[in-house]
Image (tube, coloured by chain):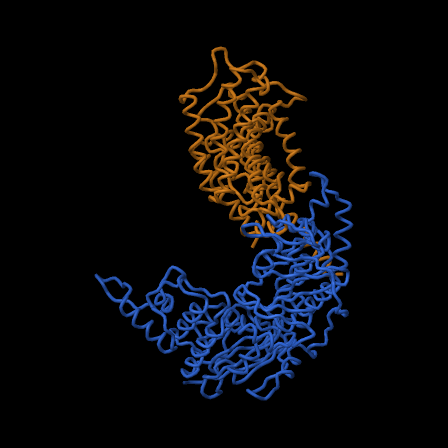
Amino acid sequence: MKRTIEAGNAARLGWLAGQIPLLALIVLCLIASALSDRFFSPININNVLMQGAVMTVITIGMTYVIICGGFDLSVGSVVALSGCVTAMAMLEAGIVAGVAAGVAVGALVGLINGLVVTRLDVNPFIATLGTMVLFRGVTFLITGGRPIVGEDGLPELFLDFAIERLFGIPYLVWLPVALFGVFHLLLHHTAYGIRVFATGGNTEAAYLAGVAVRRVRASSYVWCGALAGLAGVMLASRLQSGQPTAGAFYELTAIAAVVLGGASLFGGEGKLYKSIIGVFIMVVLANALNLANVHSYWQQVAIGLVIVAAAAADRLRRR
Amino acid sequence: MDGGALTGAAIEARGLHKRFQATLALDDVSFSVGPGEVHALIGENGAGKSTLIKILGGVHRPDRGTVEVDGRTRRFSGPRDALASGIVVIPQEMRVVPALSVAENVLIQAVPTRRFLGLAIVDRTAMARNAAALLGRLGIDIDPRARVDRLGYAERQLVMIARALSREARAVILDEPTAALEAREVERLFAAIDALKKDGVAIVYVSHRLDEVDALADTCTILRDGRAVERYERGERGRDEVIRLMTGRDIGTAPASADAGSARTLLRGPLAEEPEVAVDEGRVLGLAGLLGSGTTELLHRLFGTGRPAARIEKTGAPVGLGSPADAIRAGLGLVPGERALGLVMGLTVRENIVLPNLPLLARGLRLRKEAIDRLVESLIESVDIRPPDPDRTVRQLSGGNQQKVIFARWLAGHADVLLLDEPTHGIDIGAKAQIHRLMRRFVEDGGGIALASSEMAELLAVSDSVLAMRRGAVVGRFSREGEYTESALRSALGG
């Protein structure tokens, strides 16, 4: 009897330790509101949500790739490429074609990443480092390094997406909420999700259990690329243009968010909602430092420290 | 010689106890080995041999009891301490540095240096000379300049023994050193052990091969269920008596399937490859072989790994196996030799059971949750997984229970042929008996099993017939109608 109580306590403690990212986010919000009474103002909340929206979409894909045992450095470049392709296609053939082209080009880059990693057996870090540089170059080539705005700007309706609201919240924020719902179900409540976790947790064992591991791994890159493509579309709507320099360091922010959310970089472990908490830890931290008038150079130092500390704390907890 | 000469023992272990959670791995074990003496530790898997070695090697700390080296009590807080006191363990997986030369590997802890411009740099000439001398003392003919990754397993093992000699070892512990060796290589190893003996090194020899123990050991301790049940001098005990003491039962009493009539062949394959085997309904086919004999490769081949795709005949119908998924669809299940290959440790018991059966338990993407819960619950009960918690990650289970999870996964689907590779390796005796019962039940229900094992007693007890394999080829066939003994098997294997 006593043993089962102890076991129960241990389980509760483990659960509590798993909620540290959420607690950290809440504490961070409280500190931010103490530092500045503007933090909880509607304008600032709106800001935080807008900033988190694009990164949330990227991080959903990154979580899939990392749980599946991979890694994707190319998402930042995909955001820029997709934003520019979207703007160009939209000016030629309208909104639907533009959005479709942006997502498709992202999915295509993801497919390339997936095939290079699974068929040519290249280390994901190196493979996506290559495609990151490659597609940034392609972006500069097709744009000549200049933003894509068009003579009369992008279509009004497309720009409204980042401005208009539903129940007081911008459409741009509703989109990631819906995507999160879909991808949460897919990852945590379907046969495909179990295969993703199994492939990332132990590729050989998953293979011997009949899982088509190469296809599953490749699919995670396709999701990641397509979602980064969609993020590029969202960013183009916000920036009212396709920017070839957009998305710099987004890959690092997304990876940091996944790590802050407690997923294992070795694969096979993680929760999608925790990665999203990781996103908002990063966003709120930057926002709070801004409100407190901390110089942007110091902001980088602070964010870097938080990432290292979080990763180290996670290792200690596992030990 | 100081204190050691007085007590006469190089290593003396007294009253060792070690508990891992619920398992009492060692229960009041004492033993001693003198300088220049070979002491064999024998026992079945799970008897406590490896725990004992790990305590002597400083990996585990005993809960109670002491270890004396040369008459002085030592408390090892890690493997370094054990090494420093002169105990060298040579494990089955050897830690050589593949990219370095033989000489560098031998002298890795005693690199000779010379001064050059005030810096200590490696003295290559002295290194080659010292290494050659050490190898010569062991009667080993290996070029000291050769890179270790060019050497075979047997030669790497000799390099490790030479390294032990370079450290002035007081005692060398060899863990199943011949498991992967051929007869000729065994002779060379024995010669090296003889040389160590003459140098006054104490040798602890862990094995379950009784022929070797007879040939080599001066004294022998039998471990069973964590206790030292017997200590005897060379020649004092007959073979049958030793086996009875090891297993706690008489051999040959576990009956296999009763009727010897002809049965339906469930699986034949891999077709047009050598060897081709047949697994019959209601039968256990044993595959005997030492490490590297090809039994593992055969089982994996039958399960659809490797290129080009293997072809099999399943209940008479030809099937091409492009991947394990095809084999599973055809009704095959594999329990791989390493549990790390069979399970995803970070997933739950439920998920691991469900994983290969997802095509049956999901409609498209949607999981049939109720069906899964009912199935998993009944399987946990029938194979007796403890604790009976489907949401526990398998990493938290004991080795025996992990193995039961792999069994449960194949009982969940429609598999009627199981391919088992060392399914009871490294699990405790209770769990082992349960696995044997599960196997028995599986064939009685009309299934067939191919069982690869390096444990001859297990093979003979559980199988209806046995194929002996060596270097990827069948070198002998044994059935209960003919000679069906451990020594017949061993001579076929050339071990």
Q: Residue at x 55, y 68 (%)?
A: B290
Q: Which chain is orange?
A: A
Residue at point 53%, 44% (across, down): A310
**Rendering coords of residue A192 (x, y %):** 65, 41
Q: Position of residue B49 (x, y in %)?
A: 58, 73
Is any atom of residue B409 visible in this view?
Answer: no
Chain drawn blue, letter?
Answer: B
Question: Which one is in front, B103 or B250?
Answer: B250
Q: Furthest residue to the left? A: B117
- Front residue of B162/B120: it is B162
Question: Relative to residue A127, is residue A107 drawn left or right?
Answer: right
Q: Is residue A136 visible?
A: yes
Q: Quadrant of residue B437?
A: bottom right
Q: Quadrant of the N terminus of chain B?
A: bottom left
Horizontal and vertical percent position of residue B310: 59, 52
Query: Across the whole image, how many numbered discs are drawn on residues?
Result: 0
Instruction: Work out whether A30 lies above or below A167.
Output: below
Question: In the picture shown, does residue B181 fall above or below B308?
Answer: below
